[in-house]
Image (cartoon, grey):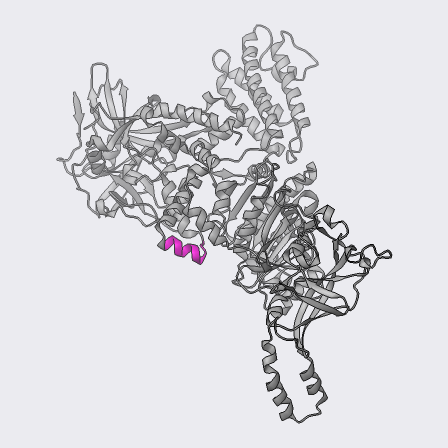
Amino acid sequence: MVGEVDGTIEEICESIDGTNLRGLLVAAGEVWFPYSIEAVKLLREGLMLAVRNTASVHLHNVSGSDEDQHLSLLRIDQVDTRHFLIDSVREARSDAPVSIEGLLNKQLQEWQRKAGDPEENNLRIIVSVSPTGLEVDLPMAASSLRGYQFQVGDQTGSTMLGEVAYLMKSEVARLVINRGMGGPKDNPTTIAAGSHTLYRNPSLDVFMDADSLFRRHFGLFGFTGAGKTNLLSTLLSRCFSAGESTDDQWSANVLLFDVNNEFFSLLIDVIVQIDAHIVFLDNEIGFSMARFLDGDFSARDAAAREFLTTTTKSSRIRKLFENDEVFRENLTLIIKLLLSAGRFKRYFSTPEPLALGFVMDEILQYGASLQARLKGTGQVKKRQAWADLLGSLSELFGDLSHRATLEDFAKLVRHLALARAYCASDTDDPENPFTETFAPTIPKSGKDRLYSDLVAVIDLLGKEIARIVKGLDTPIAARGHAIDLSGLYGVLHDDRRTLVVFLGHENSLRQFAEQLGSFVYDSRRRLGVIEPASVFVFDEADIFIPGASSPVGEDEKEAVKASKRIATTLARRGRKYGLGLGIATQRIAYLETSILAQIGTYFVGKLPRLTDRQRITEGFGIDHDNLQSGIGRVGEWVVLSHTSVGDKGSAIPVYFPDADGRITEFVRKFVIESHPEFARMVRTRDPVTNLQHDSDVLFGPVTDLSFLP
Amino acid sequence: MSKVNLGSRAGGDLSGVDLFEMAEKSVFRIVTKYGSLGQGHGTAFVYKQTLSESGSDLYLLTNLHNFDGPLGKYPQFVAEMQKGKPAEQLLSQVSIMIGDQQFEVDRIVAARGALTSHARKWIHDFAVCSIRTSIRDNLKLFAIPSGDEVRAGEAVFALGFPQDTDLGITEGMVSHVYGADDGKSEPGQYGDHEWQIQHSVLINKGNSGGPTVDKRGSVVGMSTWGDVRPGVTGINYSINVARVFEILRSSEEIEEVNIAKIYSRLIDLAAEEARYGR
């Protein structure tokens, strides 16, 4: 990790009025700074100090100040101020109380000391620090050749007591916080997730690796009002834009189980811009929406209005919707277009779609429909022979419950080929089993016509089987207004980024999570698929994976078992197959603990209860509780990650921008022309819109009035 | 020779049996075939007959939604084509069935823009079509009322082919008559009510487009939709036929729709969409 600096160490450390802020390392974990109002405001928990270490001591001193400098980086854990004189007097108790109080009053103005004021001997800022294991390496001797580049790397010496401690600027902090990570311009999976809370001017982007965020599980934990939903929106939106400034496209999927139907309005921009599907799992669906999804395009506008009233909106978006005409009209328009583009769907379950029994049903049904083609001379006999043939097909397999394989089809095709061979030949072949089937119904002698009719029908059935075999290799494509497991599997395994938002009753969501999760997990495991990263996100996770002690209603038990089962599978074994788990909850105490320990990245918001924070520190494996430092404004979170940030294992305070602002801008400025792929889908997915384009040819004035009564 | 409205207004109330007998000659099944994907069913009724030397032209009224089913099947057309089904196996067709005889409909007259509207009002859910038949008999047709003769509390009958069974008749009562001012519906509400007749006559899928007649033999409405939400019973709607004919008389408000061409365009479009990959 290399940064550039204009001069020496002084250039990368903070200063007050042109003078570097300098402290003194007085003990392994303690640095003292001279007290000033400015210094108190600068020194904050989480910031980085640098202190020369023993690697800077050189055996051969070349030219004094030109030596390479190695400065250990120490993280500030705590900042206190101390008045030494008052402390000693108070602790000694050698004076009368009034004298101590008098002294306190007298010293009061010392707290007003500014950086440029005369030296103050009694006051110090006491900063507790902990090692980061890193150091800043300033190659001073070669500085003129290397353009004053400095590096951050592993610490190579130990800090020296009595050395000067410098407060590092964001240039250094950036290298520490984002170490080992290429920026979003260099790496298709890196995102600028948010900005470091402590570095505002200039701001410091905190990078995250979206791919490992998805694959190694993440959790959002915050009290009511902490903005979990908002943060999830911001995170997902950023993850879905990963790689935009690179040539590589990162492909990933998010499956969002949205109990409260509140993500639609917070992700509407993502839904428009990528391959997204809003899937209704049960009958918790409006009348007009149901009509539309059943194929009644004339219900589109009513369905859009209805959905707008039922989907949960954040208070800011709701206010805009009520008071801002442009916003309201555009939001309604976007929903109408999303409906037209086929983004809203109903889930329908089919029996194991490619189970042999299912496939055989299809083949036999088609076979039965072909019977009508056997007409004319000998109709009864031909139809009887055909029914016998279909009967023999249906008896070909014992167990129909297994997944249809190519071998099954080979058997089927061989069987059909025998039937065809018998029908096409002029003589009875005693070796051919169909001699037994057909000969009693239609004797060979002089009945060739009947057999040639059968050959034609056998060929048609053969074609149908060939078509099904072809479909075995390609996942069934998503259907316009309905989607099944195969369709979902298909959209998760194409080369597009996909977001699927599932809506429905809690139990439907729980049970479906297991159904889909197991289907995808089993398929991936069987086929050895690990791409693309796909994450199952459970908002209100305590509903899906409650701990043993949390109350579960009688009618929920089975569903809860199901969702817990799949969440546990994903948390423990999903990573191997590129399947991640994302959870958001405020009730950590109600969460299944074993899952917490599997989470790679924690986003911690306001959490007033110590027990909640302890669950997290235990799960993450750290022993100190600094999870709330740096959390003040809305949008401020602490990120802990072993996997997807540069500064692994540290609590990084991050500010995430408000999703409402992003959505507001997107909706207010929306014009469909800016989204050509979406516009194409609206035109081709919605035949009604398309027919409107050709109205001159298809519709005309009524010239013949003879229809009038 | 044109013949309209030969209902027996003057002759006092008709019984259900009388009405059923009239319907047997003038209420027909309408079938929408979605290529090889199956078919939908509805009802159409004759309101005008023009006799000629070779037979007669029949003019029928039905619901427009008996024609727009193929639009709703569009996603399936695309999916089927992706699976390799040839276009000719997916072409839709609407026919009027008189007994075993099938009369294909390729053009209709409908409310302007109604077929391709994303927000069609129920009152615009009508279509007129004509077929040329060899029928030489003078048919006894239900009368078309000239104004708002229908009243809440009147007994009415629905005739049609519920669930694609044979012609059936059901009886009920007009519960409410909505006029022009009842068109406003709040977003998400259960449909609009403009120009509709709410009644308690049992209707089902397949009744769509069938006549709702009073005891005088007048077609007061056309069976169109019902409130099928769980727990709701006996709230069904017919659109006001007198109003439908008012619209039909205004050339500004209607258009001719080349339904056969639309179906073939639909298949071309589905083929194009199927080629895009998904």
- To which quarter of the image does residue B64 belong? top left
Indicate yes or no whether the magenta region holds residue A320: yes
In percent of the image, x 61 and y 40: which residue is there? A250
- Does A338 appear above or below A446? below
Q: Main secondary structure of the magenta part?
A: helix
Between A125 and B89, the residue placed more toward the observer is A125
- Does A516 appear above or below A471? below
In percent of the image, x 27 and y 32: which residue is there? B112
Q: Position of residue B59 (x, y in %)?
A: 24, 26
Q: Position of residue A486 (x, y in %)?
A: 58, 37
The answer to whether residue A477 shows anywhere in this view is yes
Indicate yes or no whether the magenta region holds residue A531: no
Give the magenta range. A312-322
Q: Is residue A648 left or right of residue A423?
A: right
Looking at this view, name the residue that lies furthest to the bottom: A96
Looking at this view, name the residue that lies furthest to the top: A446
Looking at this view, name the residue that lies furthest to the front: A63
Between B187 and A516, the residue placed more toward the observer is B187
Q: Is residue A708 left or right of residue A14?
A: left
The answer to whether residue A294 shows anywhere in this view is no
Q: Is residue B159 left or right of residue A129?
A: left
Q: Position of residue B172 (x, y in %)?
A: 27, 44
Looking at this view, name the residue that lies furthest to the left: B10
Give the quadrant of the C terminus of chain A: top left
Looking at the image, how many numbered discs can be counted on the residues? 0
Q: Position of residue B186 (x, y in %)?
A: 32, 50
- Does A599 appear above or below A421? below
In percent of the image, x 55 and y 14: which residue is there? A456
